[in-house]
Image (spheres, rainbow, N blue to C red):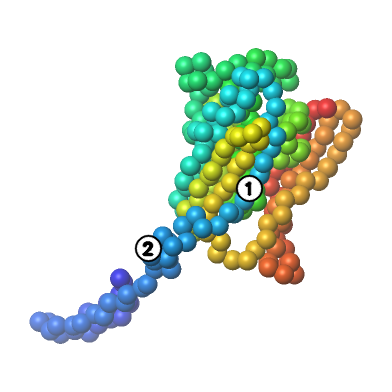
Amino acid sequence: MDFDKENARSALDRAKEGSVIEIPLRLAEPEISTKDLKKRLFADKLGTYTTKVNGTPGRLANVSLAAQKCNGAVLLEGEIFSFNDAVGEQSEKTGFYKANAILDGKIVQAYGGGICQVSSTVFAAALYANMEIAERWEHDYVSGYIDAGMDAAVAYGALDLKLGNASGYPVRMDVFYENGYLTADIWGTKTDDSVVEVETETVADSGENLEVQTYRKIYNADKSQVFVQKIAYSAYAH
């Protein structure tokens, strides 16, 4: 509820001492009611992405565990999802195994090796779900499980994947690994008929280095208009 402050001030200035004035209240109906919210909560799949998982048993276990830690995450309007906060530090104590990881351009054995496939798959799904990309990093080399420009490198305490929800409704992430495939589904509420497409463009390829620009294109229902966003620039070594 609210009232017209200017009219109220004017009425008070004109009022005689001891008189009584009435200031009408204005009742503003919310744009989204509780009933409407419950009915439409997580009703639509906003984005999805699937990648094929390969590797050692340790790597597969790391992917599965990181997916479990992300699965079911709910973001309210204006909240930020942090992959590192969701997954936590990778160590033997936290249930992770050693597997191949890249450090300073070299392949090393590290606890949590392979979890970047989870962050990359979530990032790709978030692109199609039209989520805000608050932080994202590319790998040193193009990943074998996802196209250049679609990956998201993470390193606890250094590199994070952060996604924002500006949809007006809560969103939920369903992330699961089964039968050799990793899938990230992002559920929320569609408020329009827009269509989201994601494209990558090779900016330069010298033979030693590859530069890629990632775009998100948001079309209206009949695709007569399009809004183009530059999402990420990635530079890889061959």
Image quarter for residue 149?
A: top right
Q: Look at discs 1 and 2 and give the one toward the viewer.
A: 1
User: Residue 133 placed where, x, y %?
Assistant: 60, 45
Residue at label 1? Answer: 48
The disc at residue 174 is: none
Q: Is residue 201 placed above or below 10 in the rendered structure? A: above
137 sits to left or right of 4: right
User: Residue 30 placed where, x, y %?
Assistant: 39, 68
For mark 1, give the secondary structure. Answer: strand
What is the quadrant of the N terminus in the image? Answer: bottom left
- Circle 2 packing at 10 Å, graded few (<14), some (14-19), many (20+), is few
Is any atom of residue 104 visible in this view?
no
User: Residue 60 placed where, x, y %?
Assistant: 62, 25
The disc at residue 34 is: 2
45 sits to left or right of 56: left
For mark 2, give the secondary structure. Answer: helix
What's the residue type where badge 2 is placed? Thr
Q: Are marks 1 and 2 in contact (CB under 8 Å)?
A: no
In the image, 82 versus 179, the foreground residue is: 179
- Circle 1 packing at 10 Å, graded few (<14), some (14-19), many (20+), is many
Q: Residue at x 72, y 51 (%)?
A: 198
